[in-house]
Image: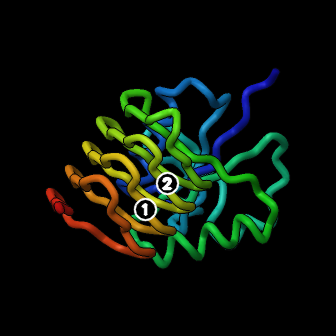
Amino acid sequence: MLKPILLILGAGGHGRSVAESAKLSGKWSDIIFADDSWPIHTSVAEYKIICDIQGLDTLEIDNLFAIAAVGNNQRREQWHSRLAALNIAQASIIHPHAIISPTARIGQGVAIMAGCVVGTNTNIADGVILNIGTLIDHDVSVEKYAHLSVGVKVVGGKDITEYSFLEVGSIIAH
């Protein structure tokens, strides 16, 4: 079976980190970007930028999956919704050095970066970012479009609400 192509919306730092995680996973035949710097910029790192965000509706690529990779929660939701409206399948990208419980539920368009641990019976909703080294204990719910920054720690049984932004090193304790 042919590996799918990954389209990443946003060629900034988070988008490049998502691309690296995707490449390391070995699941994609190609990784490409859509970014509003196009057509001035046509590449980022080793990857092509093929259009701006407005140009998504002109794409005709078979076996395409996409992820909105921008740190701003509201913009990520807008891009996520745009992909859904265009019937472009959404990918969740999980770095191969993340540890995910087999009982965890992961939504669409989620980015889980290197060193993350997602515990038993945890729910990670659509469009969430779990940045490097985020640790989530059992029975935690992270709602849509939340962004848990580098090194965030969440104890068991907590709820992280929609659009939350937890800063570097935040601890959600008992």
Calculate the distance from the C-alpha at mark 2 to the C-alpha at mark 1: 6 Å
Query: Mark 1 = which residue?
Result: 142
At x 73%, y 27%, the residue is 3
Q: Give x and y (percent) for residue 45.
A: 43, 41
Name the foreground residue: 121 vs 41: 121
Query: Mark 2 = which residue?
Result: 123
At x 60%, y 58%, the residue is 34
Q: Give x and y (percent) for residue 132.
A: 28, 45
Name the foreground residue: 134 vs 28: 134
Q: Residues within 10 Å of mark 1 (few under 14, many from 20)?
A: many
Name the foreground residue: 103 vs 18: 103
**Disc 1 element:** strand
> How many discs appear?
2
Q: Is tag 2's residue or tag 1's residue first in the polypeptide sequence?
A: 2
Q: Give x and y (percent) for residue 49.
A: 58, 51
Q: Give x and y (percent) for residue 138.
A: 36, 47
Q: Are marks 2 and 1 in contact (CB under 8 Å)?
A: yes
In the picture, the disc for residue 21 is none
Q: Amino acid at mark 2?
A: Asn
- In the figure, is residue 137 to the left or right of 143? left
Residue 18 image-quadrant placement: top left
Q: Residues within 10 Å of mark 2 (few under 14, many from 20)?
A: many
- In the figure, is residue 76 to the left or right of 99? right
Quadrant holding the N terminus: top right
At x 35%, y 73%, the residue is 164
At x 32%, y 63%, the residue is 158
Quadrant holding the C terminus: bottom left
Q: Amino acid at mark 1?
A: Val
**Disc 2 element:** strand
Placement of 111 over or under 143, stated as above or below: above
